[in-house]
Image (cartoon, rainbow, N blue to C red):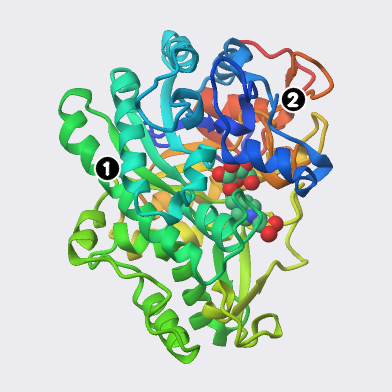
Amino acid sequence: KIDNSGHEVRRFPDSLLFGTATASYQVEGAWNEDGKSENIWDRLTHTQPCLVKNCDTGDIADNSYYNYRRDVEMMRELGLDFYRFSLSWSRVLPTSFPDQINEAGVNYYNNLINEMLKYNIQPMITLYHWDLPQKLQELGGWANPHIVDWFSDYSRVMFELFGDRVKYWFTINEPREVCYQGYAGQSMAPAYNISGMAEYLCAKNLLVAHAKVYHMYNEEYRPTQGGLVGIVLSASWFEPENEGDEEAAEELRQFEWGSFAHPIFSESGDFPPVMKEKIAAKSAAQGFLRSRLPEFTSEEIDLIKGSSDFFGLNHYTTNLVYRNDTVNGMYSSVSYYDDIEVGFYQSTEWPETGATWLKMVPWGFYKLLTKIREDYNNPPVFITENGCASREGLDDDTRVTYYKSYLDVMLDAIEDGSDVRVYTAWSLMDNFEWLEGYYDRFGLYEVDYESSERTRTPRKSAFLYKEILRTRTLDMHFEPDATLPMTI
Ligand code: GBH
């Protein structure tokens, strides 16, 4: 289709929903107010402060606990169909358990939900976006199999409280980051750093917990509440560095996201075969009496298989992969990367954005969507996060180019038959970017951290997104202007 000025303009499917996302610890602030208890990010930022850039904390963040009306106003300015946010477990259940429900915390989420619904903006809720109550961490967190019950009980209370109005639920955001960064590594709370061991326990327990909650919703709440529930996986695209590296690239894909996608979305279920084989062989050679990758029972395999109404996908960037069986020069050491035996990096030729790990590689997004369609029998895909970082300032031309080019290839994948139903820009506004503090900015709106109001101002990309949502088309030549007034 050609517009008046002769440009190619592509139309999005009428049924595609557009929104933006945030997460509780990244935006809410009010870390110890109105009865909220401590979570693992409160603990990490307060006891190891300078692990985070500039020693930043989420104590105040965007102060959304008090600014929710402005947040909804921004959603209206953009013309969003939905807004994805997460619940702070320790805000609603300060003891971690359902014996005490914190009314003030519940009121906050009710106010936010009701304000959105007033303007026909659908709430999409993530139950767990990384801020585990500290008490549960001290009991082992996701490495303790009892988390299956803890997470089920918490989720049940949330379905009871909000499920009359909320029709889209995400159980867990990015198991890969939860387990591989938080338990194997130390770039996420709780920073256990027990690689080759803790992440696999975490993965197993997390998948069972997710599946239990899926079935609980499916059997007990769906009949009356009628919503959808699924998981959100992070997946980078992994491209072989050379032709001979396809096997290495595929193995990395299976470890990085197949570990969570295969048990849920494949026909056979269970962890990916290559992951089971590699870890079992490594474990035996290292003198372990059993594989460091725990096994599922056949009941658990069946429970997990098919336990998501859609493939929730967070995608940001692409890496090149090569075979490396002397990872870090420490072949005999027990670790996740030693189990995989690959190395990866980003090409210096790819355009940079404001985050060191995030280069702009739209064709990787296309390849990933194609692979999901082919490997998992074309599931409905919800893009639950996509976006890039910038620094301060309203002229975020790189982000404008990023969104145009990633949406363009998403349309290519849809034309090929990918069943993409939801697209979510990360993020509505700048927020606490975990170990990067407030340095990496992902917002369509800039947040002024010098102002006590945490003033929000639309960037160029906000005007682009608004135009895309208004017209439901993608015009590669549209040039947004951030000096215009933003209207509703
Ligand atoms: C998402 O994670 C999160 O869901 C969201 O909360 C976050 O704000 C958003 O992305 C933006 O980061 O190469 O060692 O520096 C994305 C997961 C985070 C995985 C950064 C790769 C880089 C690790 N990615 N991480 S490193």
- 126 over 452 or under it: above or below: below
Q: Which residue is drawn at 40% across and 82% down?
A: 280
Mark earlier in primary sequence (2, 1): 1
Three-letter residue code for mark 2: Val
The residue pinned by badge 1 equals: 214
Q: Residue at x 61, y 17 (%)?
A: 33
Q: Nearer the viewer, residue 347 or 418?
A: 347
Q: How crowded is mark 2: few (under 14 residues within 10 Å), some or many (20 or more)?
A: many
Which quadrant holds residue 464? top right
Q: Which of 473 and 6 is in front in this view?
A: 473
Three-letter residue code for mark 1: Tyr
Depth check, mark 2 against mark 1: the one in front is 1
Q: Where is residue 215 in the image (x, y as percent from the top left)?
A: 21, 43
Q: Where is residue 212 in the image (x, y as percent from the top left)?
A: 26, 46
Which quadrant holds residue 364? bottom right
On-image quarter of the C terminus: top right
The residue pinned by badge 2 equals: 447
Q: Residues within 10 Å of mark 1 (few under 14, many from 20)?
A: many
- Residue located farthest toward the bottom when viewing the structure as drawn: 285
Q: Residue at x 74, y 50 (%)?
A: 355
Q: Residue at x 26, y 65 (%)?
A: 269
Q: Where is residue 173 in the image (x, y as percent from the top left)?
A: 47, 44
For ligand 1, tell me if the residue under mark 1 lies within 8 Å: no
Q: Which of 347 and 66 is in front in this view?
A: 66
Which structural element holds mark 2? strand
In the rendered structure, find residue 395 and report the number of the disc placed on it. none
- 304 over 117 or under it: above or below: below
Disc 2 vs disc 1: Cβ atoms closer than 8 Å? no
Q: Can residue 371 be seen in this view?
A: no
Which quadrant holds residue 82? top left
Cα separation, mark 2 vs mark 1, equals 36 Å
